[in-house]
Image: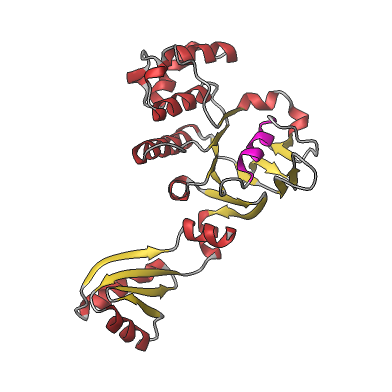
Amino acid sequence: MPNIIETHQLSFSFSKGKKIVNNLSLNVPVGSIYGFLGPNGAGKTTTMRLLTRVLPDDTNSISLFGKPVREQLPQAFSKIAALLETPALHYHLSGYDNLRCAAKLRGVSCSKIDSTLEMVEMTYAKKQRVKQYSFGMKQRLAIAICLLSEPELLMLDEPVNGLDPAGMRHIRQLLIKINKETGAAIFISSHLLNEMEKMCSHVGIIHLGSLKFEGSISELSKKFIGCAAEFEISEAEKWASRLTALNRAAQHIDENHLLVSLNNKEELPALIKQLAADDAQIYKVKVRGGLEEWFISLTK
């Protein structure tokens, strides 16, 4: 699959001796939802500013749409829409009028406004002034402005930061819908791992400016073979001993909690069935593993 974004040992520093971005080589596939993950201060926002030329890349290390950026300025940016940090909106205008202003600035037909509002599920609030919008509504309106020009690449910096769980879920579902219906690649920076795991096809994990992992979610899971199941169970110590005798790696955490190592989560149903057949009193089962634990392992 070709890449829509590539960087080749991209580096950047604001002062001598301290690189914010350090030899970063990214490969973002066409049509992907790519999660650019890292803790606060990892270099995510600086990288996105370099990709959008808010900050200059003097090393010519960035390629978009298969060609170096310098060879396709300014036309390459007609195919990109970006939302970096806080959206810039006209609070005294309605949502519709915000889109109308953006359409005129970009030379886009105003006939696209209603369908764009429908895409982000904001038709009901199009006549309402933006100053009355919730934070989540402002985010969706800002994404609608990005979509007006039908971009091939949508770049979002922390789009769910500051939202409540319902707002996060709404934005996540919206981005999956945009990717599926328009085919646009979506490049998202975030430190909220649970949200990213639910929507991304590919991830890049950055720490202190350096890339620690890049690939699909399935490739990441293969890198960290195995997981564990935590049981809330009566007489945990007894069941830990029985499983250990059956050559299973098991340990009791306390009187009511048992941890069992698995090669993969597909082993879990048979293990539960085995314990239930032996009259174990199981109250809750939780699989340990996934993006959050992998991320901590890569960045600790």
Left or right, 215 with respect to 209, comes to: left
Q: Quadrant of residue 250?
A: bottom left
The residue under the point 54% across, 37% down is 186
User: Would you say the magenta stretch is mainly helix, strand or loop?
Assistant: helix
Q: Nearer the viewer, residue 39 or 116?
A: 39
Taking 216 as reference, is 241 above or below it? below
The location of residue 270, given as percent across then percent down, is 31, 73
Quadrant location of the C terminus in the rendered image: bottom right
Q: Does the magenta-highlighted stretch encompass residue 45?
A: yes
**Residue 260 image point, x, y percent:** 38, 75
Indicate the position of residue 175 as horizontal and vertical percent values.
45, 36
Where does residue 254 sit, x and y in percent of width and height? 32, 75
Q: Which residue is depicted at the point 49% across and 31% down?
A: 182
Residue drawn at (73%, 39%) of the image = 62
Q: Residue furthest bottom?
A: 245
Question: In the figure, 177 relative to 299: above or below?
Answer: above
Closer to us: 245 or 106: 245
Here the colouring is secondary structure
Give left or right: position of 67 versus 204.
right
In this rendering, the answer to whether 297 lies above or below 167 is below
Which contiguous range is marked in magenta? 43-53
Number of numbered discs on residues: 0
Q: On the picture, is 256 further left or further right than 83?
A: left
Q: Residue at x 64, y 43 (%)?
A: 3
Q: Is residue 138 magenta?
A: no
